[in-house]
Image (tube, rainbow, N blue to C red):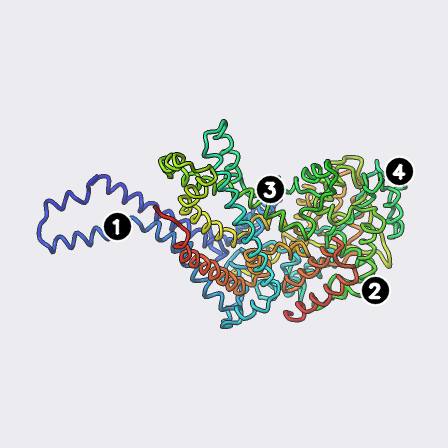
Amino acid sequence: MKFRRLVISCIAVFFALGAAACSSGGGSGGKGGKSGGKVDIVWWFPAKEQEATMKKIAEEFNKKQDHINLKPQLNAGADYYTKLQTVLAAKNGPDVMWMNGPNFPKFQSKGFLMKLDNKVDTDGVSMTNYPESLVKLYSKDGYYGIPKDYDTIGLFYNKEMFDKAGVPYPSDKWTWDDLRSAALKLTVKSGKTASQWGIAAHLSTQEVVYPFLVQNGVLPIAEDRKSLKYDSPEGIEAVQFLFDLMYKDGSSPDGQYMTDNDPLQLFQSGKVAMIMSGSWQAKPYYDALKDKVDVQMLPSHMKSGNIIHGVAWVGNANSKHPDEVWEVLKYLGSKEVAMLQAETGTVIPAFNGTQDAWVKSMPLNLKIFIDSTSIAEPYPSAFDPEWETPVNTHLTNIWLNKETPSDGLKKITEESNKVLAATN
Amino acid sequence: MSLAKEPQMMLTGSAVKSALRTREMLWGYFFIAPVVIGLFIFVVIPIIASLVLSFSSWDGSSNMNFIGLDNFVKMFSDQVYLKALRTTTVYTAITVPATIILSVMVAVMLNRQIRGRDVYRLIFFLPSVTMPVAIAVVWKWMYNGSNGLINYLLSLVGIDGPGWITDERFILTSIMIIAIWGGIGYNMIILLSGLQGIPDTYYEAASLDGATSWSRFANITVPLLTPAIFFVLVTSLIGAFQVFDLVFMLTPVTSGGGAGGVLQDATRTAVFSIYQNGFTWFKIGYASAQAWVLFVIIFLITMLQMYLQKRWVHYE
């Protein structure tokens, strides 16, 4: 009999624990409980490497005032946005959260996000504190996000390889033609196969294709996010230029080679002299190549151009404490928080004038990433994430030399426009 | 621990007995409850939910719109999905027979008393206990078109090897090679146990009658191994129709996250299509419908096999 009682109590305990675990799992959302007379504001973010900074920010905030208890919660993993969508749809979830560009239109259009215009106007917060293109990224019929940080694209190059080939370093006046002739000079071929390439024209929409489109006057997506025009002569010229680096000049490894071998690794191991990469690559490249690496503005063609993307803080439209949410957002958008982030060196803070700390964190020409904001277009996004599928599909085909640039771009334009027209 | 018997001896009377039976039954249900509840929450309810969702156009967050059979109708004109079904069929039709034939050969060889038998068995079984991700990474390295091991070996005999996983004409074959290589070990274990169940006396009798080793294999080993082969066939067919991880690992993904192009068209399988619709594009209703169609296909094929087994599976 003793045995039975033991088993039963074990099972009872098991169930009790299970039920408790479930209820706490479901209740992590921001119902806005009060602890010690304070309002709890739950704050979600997915970046593990920034957890320490976020915790420090919350600590500072909680010290500053006595009626809000800001609770930072790390939700790392690829399913952050899936999870966020599920809890927000249930009118639950965090009060304040991390948002990126591609996901913003969808979350905004479902009414999940708090509109900030009233608060911004009455509270004397100036959106001119942040790069305009970044503010634009998180606006629809008004402001929805407070920019947190951003990234732009630069032309990284290996100084040692330039010295060896006797080619002058890239300048901020470089055009596509300069890039092309330098890449050719830096390429070393032995027979049919190259042992060193001048450039890696890798297939990255954000770092390569979109910036080159912008430099030729083509927007990655129309301002109203309802169409794109990649099949214009300028669009075709831009992609043809990249294609020719691979398949005409041979100054870049071709698409197949870069599918097998990570182009970023090729640059880090000194097999490629130049590569277009985002500001987030500065630290890994510097760690790998030390004083051999530097960075310059992207070359220009019709005009100079770049792509900017950045994360923003947004509020939950269904939060029980909209006023407190705004107070937190205001603090997160402040210069003080921007400085806290800049000191870590991982991200470029969005608050204008606080980027110096990041620029000084490595002995590279990092200033170009800040200067590029004025010529940058926001990373394209639209309500239905499927719009980018034709882009990726046909660009892959072009890079693998299975479709010509003009055929591929025509198909992208046709198929993406169909998706964009159907859903907006 | 004869907890049940003990009180029975002390009590008489049918009313008491049936009350006791009820109590025992209740305890029985109580004890299996953790498993049953788990099964319901994680298996039965999701299955029912996906059936319901397959008649809707749900995107994961909006209100559910029921659209009747639209998802199923759409599927039959969706060229991408039809191609995925064809790819899955080709994959199954090649990997399953190839794996089984090779597994039978390996099992028969490793059933003999040869030196280092256990080492060979271990080598063949190793892929089954290795993480698929690790397998994919190593194969990717070997398949590298410019400096991979395979093309290096081919270059020694003067062959200019292809881009195994960067050329749409080869990538599916490359994936199937890994699948066959990885499937042999598990099947071999099942078949080995089948082989060890065949009594030696049959072989002795056959030898006395002068049967050659081939005719012993064809007339004793194979027929008596058919129950094991049947089991292996059913499970590998189901597994092959559900192939996902290898495809997912070996098809290159572009920075946009969506991936695509000729390489993905060449390798998109039925489950990959479900994944893509459900979790890349959030067409959860359509993905559920595809999942149910796949289920029906697998179910019908398995039933057909159950029916056909009477003709070729020999039970002693």
Pointer 4 or 2: first along the chain: 4
What is the number of the mark on residue A370? none
Of the 4 image quadrants, the one containing the C terminus of chain A is: bottom right
* Residue that badge 2 annotates: A233
* Residue that badge 4 annotates: A165
- Three-letter amino acid code at the position of disc 1: Gly
Q: Chain of mark 3?
A: A
Along the horizontal axis of the image, is A181 left or right of B189? Answer: right
* Residue that badge 3 annotates: A52
Dots 3 and 1 on the same chain: no
Dots 4 and 1 on the same chain: no
Front position among marks 4 and 3: 4
- Marks 4 and 1, Cα distance to the nearest angstrom? 81 Å
SS of the residue under disc 3: helix
What is the number of the mark on residue B28? 1
Q: Chain of mark 1?
A: B
Q: Determine which quarter of the picture holds residue A108.
A: bottom right
Local packing at callout 1 (Cα closer than 10 Å; few below 14, some 14-19, many 20+) is few
- Three-letter amino acid code at the position of disc 3: Ala
Residue B283: image location, x then y, percent: 56, 63
Along the horizontal axis of the image, is A114 left or right of A360? Answer: left
